[in-house]
Image (cartoon, rainbow, N blue to C red):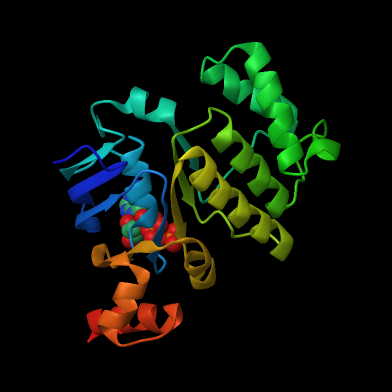
Amino acid sequence: MTTTHAIDVEGLTKRFGEVTAVDEITFAVEPGEVFGFMGHNGAGKTTTLRMLLGLTPLTSGSARVLGREVGRETIEIRRTAGYLPAHYTLPPDMTPRQFLHYVGAMFGLPRGVVAARAEALLQRFDLVRAADRALRGFSTGMTQKVGLAQALLNEPRVLLLDEPTSGLDPLGRHELLELLRELARDKGVTVVFSSHILSDVEALCRRVAVLHRARLVAFGDVEHLKAQHGVRTMDDLYLALVRKEAA
Ligand SMILES: Nc1ncnc2c1ncn2[C@@H]1O[C@H](COP(=O)(O)OP(=O)(O)OP(=O)(O)O)[C@@H](O)[C@H]1O
């Protein structure tokens, strides 16, 4: 297995008892790309992202994140990765500013560094006015923004985002997509972005992986996949892939 890819997944499988959540999937993500990870509900996207971070042990197969072996080098991977879970419960009594300081301390970052990064992120996500309000009662979109800020606090080289645009209003969504584009282009951050929202994937990603019922049904360049399946839009590509599997 080569280590020049930012993420390298080979034959990755996860079973929960009788349920096969991820079934021998193989794909790679290049450094500095924004990669789309698509699939229906229950396709296995969250489980895959959680395995990459060592949050769920893998059943078989292997994976590397920036050359570090998943399952064996979890601490090193977490240090260089940012993660936004799909479902996020923030500590209700903390404020966004306190929460970011708490996350920074968990990463072992010096206080001054955390303070500077936290302020920049609060500004970036338009959270300055809410920075000292308790997180209890934050709207879905605001919670999502705090989640994104914590995912960026350690200046990750790899960013794994599980449904990051869900819950954001159109402006928030536009700004997030712009931010991800910028992080990849200007800072070389590798972004894996799971979504059901095909237009977001199409706007941002040149390459995708499509999961369907735990299996990888497509992987590669979107334009190439469209040509291969004789379709012109992302919607049609997705439907063609999923219907082919169902047939
Ligand atoms: N801890 C668990 N125990 C048992 N089954 C699980 C567990 N976690 C996930 N699964 C099952 O694994 C399959 C894949 O789930 P996963 O959450 O990875 O899908 P997903 O593509 O992220 O879906 P969604 O878009 O709905 O979040 C589902 O059938 C799910 O019910």
In the rendered image, the vertical position of residue 80 relative to residue 184, given as above or below: above
Image coordinates of residue 61 in percent, x first then y, are 15, 45
Which corner quadrant holds the N terminus?
top left
Whether residue 178 is visible to the viewer of this picture, yes or no, is: yes
Which residue reaches farthest right? 129
- Between residues 233 and 210, which one lies in front from this camera angle? 233
Q: Is residue 220 left or right of residue 79?
A: left
Image coordinates of residue 133 in percent, x first then y, are 82, 34
In the rendered image, the vertical position of residue 44 relative to residue 58, given as above or below: below
Q: Is residue 101 left or right of residue 245?
A: right
Image coordinates of residue 19 in percent, x first then y, are 24, 58
Q: Is residue 172 left or right of residue 180?
A: right
Whether residue 16 is visible to the viewer of this picture, yes or no, is: no
Q: Residue at x 36, y 63 (%)?
A: 208
Give the number of callouts. Answer: 0
Report which quarter residue 214 is drawn in. Answer: bottom left
Q: Residue at x 30, y 43 (%)?
A: 7
Report which quarter residue 57 is drawn in. Answer: top left
The quadrant of the rendered image in which ligand 1 is seen is bottom left
Q: Residue at x 67, y 55 (%)?
A: 175
In the rendered image, the vertical position of residue 195 relative to residue 85, given as above or below: below
Image coordinates of residue 109 in percent, x first then y, are 56, 16
In the rendered image, the vertical position of residue 241 relative to residue 156, given as above or below: below
Q: Residue at x 66, y 40 (%)?
A: 146
Which corner quadrant holds the C terminus?
bottom left
